[in-house]
Amino acid sequence: MQLRRLLAVGWLVVVLLLTESRAAALSPYQPRCQCDSVRILSLQSPPLTGADVTELQLQLTRLGFYQGTVDGVYCPLVAQAVKKMQAAVGLPSTGKVDEATWEKLVSQEIRPAGTPSAPPKGIISILVDIDAQTLVVYSDGAPYKLYPVAIGKPESPTPVGEWVITEKAAGWHGATGIRWMRLSNPWGSYGIHGTNNPGSIGQMSSAGCVRMFNHDVVELYDWVREGTLVVLKRNGPATLLRRQFTMGMVGQDVVYIQWRLRELGFDPGRADGVYGEDTARAVASWQKYRGLTATGQIDENLLYLLGLI
Amino acid sequence: MAGLNQRWVPRILLVFLIVLGLRLWQIGCILPSNKQFDFSNQINPDKKYTVLLWDFDRPLPAGASYREELQREIQAFNKSYPNIRVELRLFRWDQEEEVIAAIKRHQDLPDVLATGPLTDLAFADEILLSDSYLAPEDKREYVPLALASIALGPDIAVWPRYLAPQLYLANRDYLQAAGLATETRQQEGLAWEDFLALGEKLYQLPQQPFVLASFDYQGLLAAVAPRQLDKVGESLISWPASVAPEAVKRVQELYQRGYLPPTVCQEGYLGLQDFFSGRAALLTPAEPWLLRMVSERTDRLQRGLLAYEDAKSFPVVLVPPRLTPTSGLPVRTEGLVVFKRRAADEIKAAAMVASYLSKSGTLPAQLDLLPAYRPAQEAWSQAWRWGNESVLLTILEHPIALMPYPYTELEGKDA
């Protein structure tokens, strides 16, 4: 009898041990074995390097705390970002990445863009830097708050230009998250919105829209109104698929022409991608000022002079 | 009644004569002839002067403000002359006709007018000839082209300010391939015979580039036209309409030899592409602004703002037309006009403002123009940085200019 009891207890212990080891294996950041233990990351000299630092940088970038290079080196910039993140989620701001910090890092519950801000008092405008993947709110022309965003994939790039918000909608809409603000872009349906995939923020992952964390887009939504100016910019070559431009044409290449005209001192109005009267007038004005025939139209030769081809 | 008339008539006559005398004296002050004007009058340092300056607002690149730049120059002037207040009024640069009409109607007159794009000095009787104001040593500091091209009869009418000469932009590779030394051509310029020789050599190259491209057909005519002195006088040099047939004949000759693009006679021909795509060796007219555009384009290419696969790049150089004692250079000149509408010391204050502004160095660089005042050239060179400034500045030393500008008298688009 005692032997049976002993066997039962032993069996139970074995089952318990097996169950615990399986649970441990399912936990995302538990070591699979002793040699695969999670080390504590901190600022050291020489700096720590490795795949875990790369992962840390990726997570910090995703959450908007880190804008540096993802190179697997635990540099002072990374330590600073870790401290910011820890402060934001209520952890001691040590700069050391321990288990508790990892848990918070991989959790999507934390607020990455700082605490909620009071609404700006000035006139609001928005600048989306596509290269930096950030959205900056300006109040009376001065930067007020910065948010991390996701922008378009290479095959569906975010359209650059000077748009205004034409429509606002609240409520859950799946992939566009909890808020939606349509931009005035004339050749597609693009907007600033939330997401059902917070992990995509900080990446080129959208179909061309500007994607934000839901709690960020909720805050922004209340600040802006229809007509708010939204400038989307990026560095890099202008892509011009056409060589002749006349009144009524619409497209991304028109935006580049409008920006270039403004650089030269001839104002085509808002760079809205529409070759309208203002743009034609600016072109004619430039031609006349330089002694050329003022047609108001742009051909390949003028594109060359504008430095666009 | 008769006694009353006898008593009052002389008195009324006396008052009339006094009023008439005062009026004549006033007119004498307002519109003194240039010969009568006493330039030894000095402005009174204790008196406050206000000089009304009219200028034309210009588009400046990168969002810079012409008004602010000009105000900066005025502030610098006021450091030396704090008692001369300059009241600035800017018109749009394309308001030339309205401004001239207003001045002709005497609706409103400035003390100093920046000619900007003005070419019609129809109000010449009312302006102070700078010739009689400029001291000989001061006059020598202005480049000859500037002095020669703003003239009224034998006199210089305005204070020269900016210039824009027309040159050829040349593909250096083609010049070298044709055996033409760039430096020599830059010094000696290009004459009609050079076009023929260049065409012959380029025709033997595998790609057979054309000799010349221009913005349009008029530009082509201007490029090959014989430039000669008009018979009016040495200081009034123009391109007589009688040379137009010769220009057409020359273009025809180049065309028949195959030295010009086949599309050159078509309506709306624009030859920029011919040059920039490497199909032509020369582009004309090349003013400083064109050099800025070409340089900016190169800069955009280097900064990755231009898709390289579509871009062609080759070295370019500036070459002047062949300048001889009987052939001048087309040059657009801007100046400052001083009106004789006030007392002598006030006119002098206005002349001092005009004189100061005509010596600007950095502002013309932003406008893609060249300074007329030689000592300002160093500051201009530092601020301009868009091309070979030494060629541009050297060319200004040529004593003869062509007027008028632009060419409007050419006819015969039938080559």
Image (cartoon, rainbow, N blue to C red):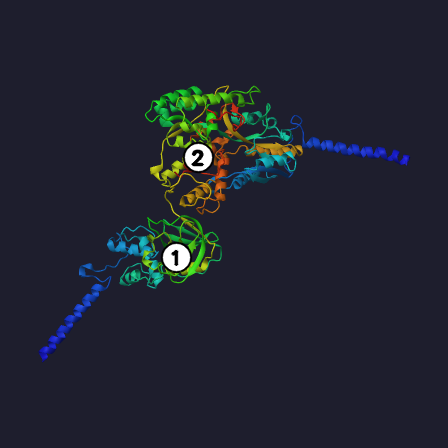
Q: What is the secondary structure assignment of the residue under circle 1?
A: strand
Q: Nearer the viewer, residue B199 or B395?
A: B199
Mark 2, other Cα within 10 Å: few <14 / some 14–19 / many ≥20:
some
Q: Residue at x 77, y 34 (%)?
A: B19
What mark, if any, has residue A193 been given in the picture? 1
What is the three-letter code of the residue carrying label 1?
Answer: His
Q: Quadrant of residue B73?
A: top right
Q: Nearer the viewer, residue A240 or B134?
A: A240
Instruction: Tell me the subunit letter for badge 2.
Output: B
What quarter of the picture does the N terminus of chain A occupy? Answer: bottom left
What quarter of the picture does the C terminus of chain A occupy? Answer: top left
Q: Nearer the viewer, residue A168 or B64?
A: A168
Residue A119 position in % (x across, y down): 46, 60
In the picture of the structure, the residue carrying the numbered disc 2 is: B292
From this view, report whether residue B84 is shown above or below residue A192. Answer: above
Mark 1 vs mark 2, foreground winner is 1
Instruction: Tell me the subunit letter for badge 1.
Output: A
Residue B55 position in % (x across, y down): 57, 37
